[in-house]
Amino acid sequence: MEVLVAERCGFCHGVSNAISIAEEVLADKEAGGQVYCLGPIIHNRDEVDRLAKAGLKTVDSVDEIRSGTVLIRSHGAAPKQIQSLKERGLNIVDATCVLVKRVQRIARELETDGYKVVIVGEERHPEVQAVVGCAKNVVVIADKSDLHKLPQNAKLGVVCQTTQSPEHFGAMLGAIGQGSFSEMKVINTLCKEAIKRQESAIRLCRRVDAMFVLGGLESANTRRLAELCRKVNSQTFHLQNWSELDRSVIGGKRVAGVTAGASTPKWIIDEFVTNLRAVEDGGF
């Protein structure tokens, strides 16, 4: 069986930057004290576990932190959380993705300009929750079933969770546009790197008998990759790492494709590809 890897896959710049910052903080012995991360630094269990062994402690709430250094993860944090950390006198290191910061800034500007802020995305996703905290009464629209949340005859300022697909964002804009509003301002906040990964994955999955999408099951961008690939190739499998592979799915397959979400480290991709090629060579 031949194994092909997508041209664009794995860590994006924002995630790579967050990991580098975490490693630098953990290596800085002069800083002293415990290093915390407010929520998982990225949505990849293996990488979170690796950094935990190096000393990064993940917490769910500001209330769990009494002293030390706090790392703001790539998804960002709400202004109230940042303020609470400052009031506690904690050392704050910001690893928020610059594109996420842009969405936060735009949300504030739209509200200041009199728009009702609408974000197309997953309500429970930390990136979205951080954006929600930047304005008052933000409306989160995941799909068409949420359209009833929109106020009637309002000025709508619409943005999007950075890792959504252009197709979904476009479809939601069309659905919102059929409703009742006095004005609608749309700002494209999609991540270009996420889009490139989606396009690269789709191109590859058309050429293979089985497609493997590597990344955390809780990773929004990885789930989106798997959803898009599955529409083109029904033999698409979302796995976190090599240990989750069911060997029966590659039986009778000649060519396999591999891609990975923006929060999937290179070592997981390399391990998976190496082991899959070893199957081909009779190594397993």
Image: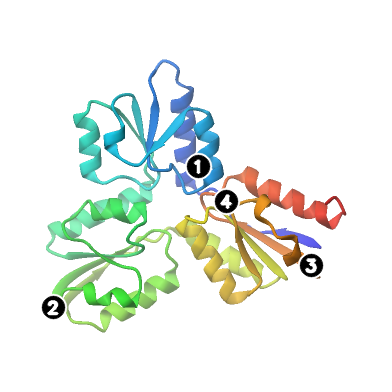
Task: Give the amino acid at mark 3.
Answer: Gly
Local crowd size for mark 3, using a 10 Å CA cut-off: few (<14), some (14–19), many (≥20): few
Question: Which residue type carries mark 2?
Answer: Asn
Specify whether residue 68 is in view. Answer: yes
Q: Which residue is mark 1?
A: 16
Marks 4 and 2 sit apart, C-alpha to C-alpha, by: 42 Å
Q: Which mark is residue 251?
A: 3
**Kind of residue sitting beneath label 4:** Gly
Foreground tag (3 vs 2): 3
Between discs 4 and 2, the one toward the N terminus: 4
Could you say which disc has been placed on residue 10 in the image?
Answer: 4
Amino acid type at mark 1:
Ser
Residue at (56% x, 49% y) in the render: 264
Q: Residues within 10 Å of mark 1 (few under 14, many from 20)?
A: many
Closer to the camera, 209 or 159? 209
Label 3 close to label 2 by CB (< 8 Å):
no
SS of the residue under disc 4: loop
Query: Element under label 2?
Result: loop
Q: Is residue 273 above or below residue 46?
A: below
Which label's residue is closer to the chain start, 2 or 1? 1
Name the residue beneath numbered marker 2.
153
In this rendered view, identify the residue nearer to me: 136 or 6. Answer: 136
Q: Give the mark nearest the N terminus, 4 or 1.
A: 4
Q: Answer with mark 3 or mark 2, whichever residue precedes in sequence.
A: 2
Quadrant showing the N terminus = bottom right
